[in-house]
Amino acid sequence: MNRDKHIRKSSLIVAAAALGFGITWAVGGGCSNGGTSATSNAQKGTGDCPPNTGTQVAGRDGGTTTVTLPAGASLITDGQQTFRFDTFGDEVFWGDTIKLHQAIEGAANGGVGPGVSPAAALQLGLKVDVDALPPAIVDGLKAGTVDLNDPATTLALLRLNAVVGVTGIFDGTDASPSPTSGPMKSMGIQCALCHSTVDDSFAAGIGHRRDGWANRDLNVGAIIAAAPDLSVVANLLGVDQATVRTVLNAWGPGKFDAELLLDGKGFRPDGKTAATLIPPAFGLAGINLHTWTGWGSVPYWNAFVAVLEMHGVGSFFDPRLDDATKFPVAAKNHFGHVVVDEAHDRVTPKLPGLHLYQMALTAPTPAAGSFDTAAADRGDKLFASKAKCVTCHVEPLTTEPGWNMHTPAEVGVDDFQANRAPDNRYRTSPLHGLFTHTKGGFYHDGRFATLLDVVNHYDTLMSLGLSEQEKSDVVEYLKSL
């Protein structure tokens, strides 16, 4: 196995269907190198690439690669627009219902509380798209004349559409803010919130977009917990708002619980949070299931998340959620049968382009010098032989072609998270681009802090008899993917 051969994610009931920021499986591309002109054009609604001339998609080094697309390829740039900027109408939940925008504004700007300054937002893991900033702001940041401790500066960034995955909705506009917009009256979120980050090229948390990279810095739970009114969530769970905030604040950076308002389980039996790590959303072409526990493929999960997680206005169907024993909250509220008429459905028409855009992204590859090449070559051979990794991580996909699922016993872990999903199993996760999501650990809940911990786990589980050197070589190979 040579590494070079490897191929390198309405009504109030609709709005309150589930809790959390979007986990839509969508990945980045663009019409520009690094996203500069694509971002600018996307904000103006003119970001389509000319058909038959090619477009830019994220490349293996974290940059971009040009691919030639056939006529009609504007679907892929439509998908980028959707992924980066479409709220699907979810502002009816995030702003109008739980009033999260008021916590961002702060009392001094018409909201409540201290507000969220740029410095605080960066601490919470939110990212800023440097390509959306005008030269005057960039110069001010460099000179230190922009006040990063003032929530009013956050509002200015939202007016520029510069906060990745978040849209501020202001008086005097529809859903497209501008530098001259009035006070913020609501807010929405996009797929990019959890599944984009930036390259930190300007400063920590500020840089060019990296769509599809898991944002393991994002403290989703703490952000939601700051919303002034979580009564709709508390009512669905049958608890008080203080309990909801306790659950949310337990998630921690890089984690999200997509099942909380399906089954009502905020914690594991051992007292740890029931939330799981945000996974990467790149390199999914040719791979079947796309969540830790195999709920569905990309088109399924896009619809699920847009409607039930992002709280967008759209239709969604999954009769598996009628199981009142497994999914009591979902079954009681008919979350598997959400119907919005065609004229008002803001999700379904966007699914084809979003899907195509996602499938266009290959996983990035690690920088030269970030792993031991000779050791990785040895680990490559072990991967396909003594270590038996290819038993499940079939190359070049590094997951099984077909139904890539296993029982908890086969994986050697407990069944808590598996049993929260319809098939009671765990997915074989693809391995390319592991270097982008080492923060927070490995497996669905980060239980293994390092890749060596993962290798040790399987060495014991499968009685492989790997030497310490062989384990180290396998780790270097995994780092090279």
Image (cartoon, rainbow, N blue to C red):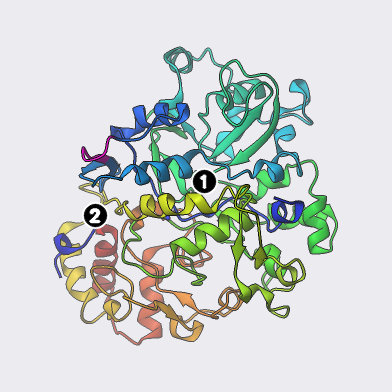
Q: Secondary structure at mark 1?
A: loop
- Figure check: 23 above or below 392: above
Residue at image point 51% right, 62% down: 301
Q: Camera-side residue: 105 or 42?
A: 42
Q: Secondary structure at mark 2?
A: loop
Residue 401 x, y percent position in the rendering: 31, 75
Q: How many marks?
A: 2
Q: Camera-side residue: 329 or 446?
A: 329
Q: Quadrant of the N terminus?
A: bottom left
149 left or right of 73 in image: right
Numbered circle sitting on residue 217: 1
Is 75 part of what is drawn in magenta? no
Is 52 part of what is drawn in magenta? yes
Q: Is residue 407 visible?
A: yes
Q: Nearer the viewer, mark 2 or mark 1?
A: 1
Residue 439 x, y percent position in the rendering: 45, 53
The magenta span reads 50-55
Residue at image point 26% right, 59% down: 481
Of the numbered discs 2 and 1, the one sitting upstream in the chain is 1
Residue 354 x, y percent position in the rendering: 43, 50
Mark 1 is on which residue type? Asp
- Figure check: 230 above or below 40: below
Q: Is residue 277 visible?
A: no
- Figure check: 83 above or below 281: above
401 left or right of 440 in image: left
Residue at image point 58% right, 22% down: 148
Q: Main secondary structure of the magenta part?
A: loop
- Residue 385: which quarter of the image? bottom left
Residue at image point 36% right, 67% down: 452
Mark 2 is on which residue type? Phe
176 left or right of 5 in image: right
The residue indicated by pointer 2 is: 371
